[in-house]
């Protein structure tokens, strides 16, 4: 009987000790002991001026959440994100485009400022919080914590930003609020709801599978570079092709010239490459073709064309030419006349392929 009483007392003691552990600490243990966390984010961004609310839904999966530079994937109605082995890709299915950063510094800065890295549950749990109270959300008790994120002054007014998190009974963050106060008056409240959690203890490595038939574009070039328009005078240039031969482009030539800008990582560019390397492509003798892979190394381009008969110059590793010709994605094709003026500017395989077929009578 004494043994039974002792066991009961021990269990009660353990229960009391467990109850004394704040929900915040138990949430940290739950998140950071997991190796994979999946969840849904629903965010609401109100516009104080118009009263309209912007909403987005994203499914996230985080790998090794305890890591500062954790890997992740995400998915919404039109696009996906992948960050693995230090490389980030956004796959936009509605546009059939793969976006990536040209510079690693730009990529890393963008990721650090992303909603996931700023307002995701694992980031929030690493902040210092003060317990406020227990509050009801949808009829269930949640532990409410707050954090003064910043206090700044602008045009003589104090602007304070507060973060609030709400931890549910199963020790997950179910709600996050970012409240902005101007001179003590509440301005905008951004709300994130987190749901559909799945915690996995098993280490899982995910695969990045990019569509093979999508175009490739760089974020940095979208605002700074635009393809050259018709009647633009083309600059002269010299380059070395993958065979070590010098290629000279003189705007005053006896032939028209096709300048095709491609990338080894672009699915749309590969569609064009497959066609111009096929037996169906027989270019008019009065037109010559120069294929430029400006952002690819010579080694990668040489490998790209291995065991293929190439009857036209292929120029690698010339980003400066891409800058001069306004190349912000691939493939882009210019038809240059004998006077060095652009007579056609074509962007993407849906424009380029029919045009090339028209030149060959196919």
Image (spheres, rainbow, N blue to C red):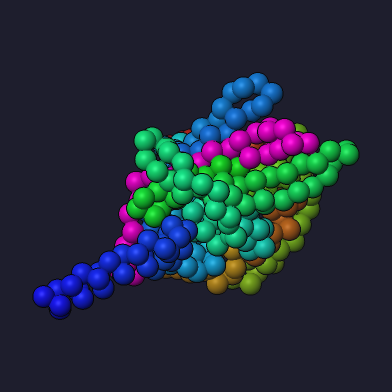
Q: Residue at x 67, y 67 (%)?
A: 240
Q: Is residue 190 magenta?
A: yes
Q: Nearer the viewer, residue 28 or 242?
A: 28
Between 324 and 115, the one lying in front of the other is 115
| Residue 196: image location, x then y, percent | 34, 46
Taking the image as shown, residue 221 lies to the left or right of residue 302, namely right
In the image, residue 293 sits, relative to residue 245, either above or below, namely above
Q: Position of residue 258 (x, y in %)?
A: 62, 46
Left or right: 74 with respect to 129? left
* Main secondary-structure element of the magenta-colored stretch: strand
Above or below residue 201? Residue 73 is above
Magenta highlight range:
179-207
Q: Nearer the viewer, residue 85 or 135?
A: 135
Point 65% across, 21% down: residue: 50
The quadrant holding residue 241 is bottom right
Give whichever of 189, 332 is nearer the camera.
Answer: 189
| Quarter of the picture holding the C terminus | top left
Q: Residue at x 88, y 39 (%)?
A: 156
Instruction: Kindly give the residue lying farthest to the front in the view shown.
Output: 2
Residue positioned most to the top:
50
Say left or right for 63 vs 314.
Answer: left
């Amino acid at each position: 009987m004494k043994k039974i009483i002792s066991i009961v007392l021990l269990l009660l003691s353990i229960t009391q000790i467990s109850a004394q552990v704040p929900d915040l600490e138990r949430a940290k243990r739950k998140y950071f002991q997991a190796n994979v966390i999946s969840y849904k984010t629903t965010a609401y961004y109100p516009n104080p001026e118009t009263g309209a609310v912007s909403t987005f839904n994203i499914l996230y999966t985080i790998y090794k959440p305890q890591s500062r530079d954790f890997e992740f994937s995400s998915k919404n109605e039109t696009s996906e994100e992948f960050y693995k082995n230090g490389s980030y890709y956004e796959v936009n299915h509605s546009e059939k485009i793969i976006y990536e950063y040209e510079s690693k510094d730009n990529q890393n800065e963008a990721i650090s400022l992303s909603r996931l890295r700023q307002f995701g549950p694992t980031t929030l749990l690493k902040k210092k919080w003060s317990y406020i109270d227990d509050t009801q959300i949808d009829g269930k008790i949640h532990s409410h914590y707050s954090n003064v994120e910043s206090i700044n002054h602008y045009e003589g007014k104090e602007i304070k930003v507060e973060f609030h998190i709400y931890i549910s009974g199963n020790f997950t963050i179910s709600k996050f609020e970012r409240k902005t106060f101007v001179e003590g008056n509440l301005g905008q409240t951004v709300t994130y709801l987190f749901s559909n959690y799945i915690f996995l203890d098993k280490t899982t490595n995910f695969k990045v599978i990019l569509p093979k038939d999508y175009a490739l574009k760089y974020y940095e070039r979208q605002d700074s570079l635009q393809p050259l328009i018709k009647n633009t005078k083309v600059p002269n240039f010299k380059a070395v092709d993958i065979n070590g031969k010098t290629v000279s482009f003189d705007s005053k030539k006896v032939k028209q010239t096709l300048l095709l800008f491609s990338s080894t990582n672009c699915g749309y560019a590969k569609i064009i490459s497959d066609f111009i390397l096929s037996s169906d492509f027989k270019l008019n003798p009065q037109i010559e073709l120069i294929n430029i892979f400006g952002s690819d190394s010579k080694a990668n381009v040489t490998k790209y064309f291995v065991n293929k008969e190439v009857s036209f110059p292929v120029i690698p590793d010339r980003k400066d030419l891409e800058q001069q010709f306004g190349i912000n994605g691939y493939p882009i094709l210019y038809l240059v006349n004998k006077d060095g003026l652009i007579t056609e500017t074509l962007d993407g395989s849906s424009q380029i392929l029919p045009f090339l077929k028209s030149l060959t009578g196919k």
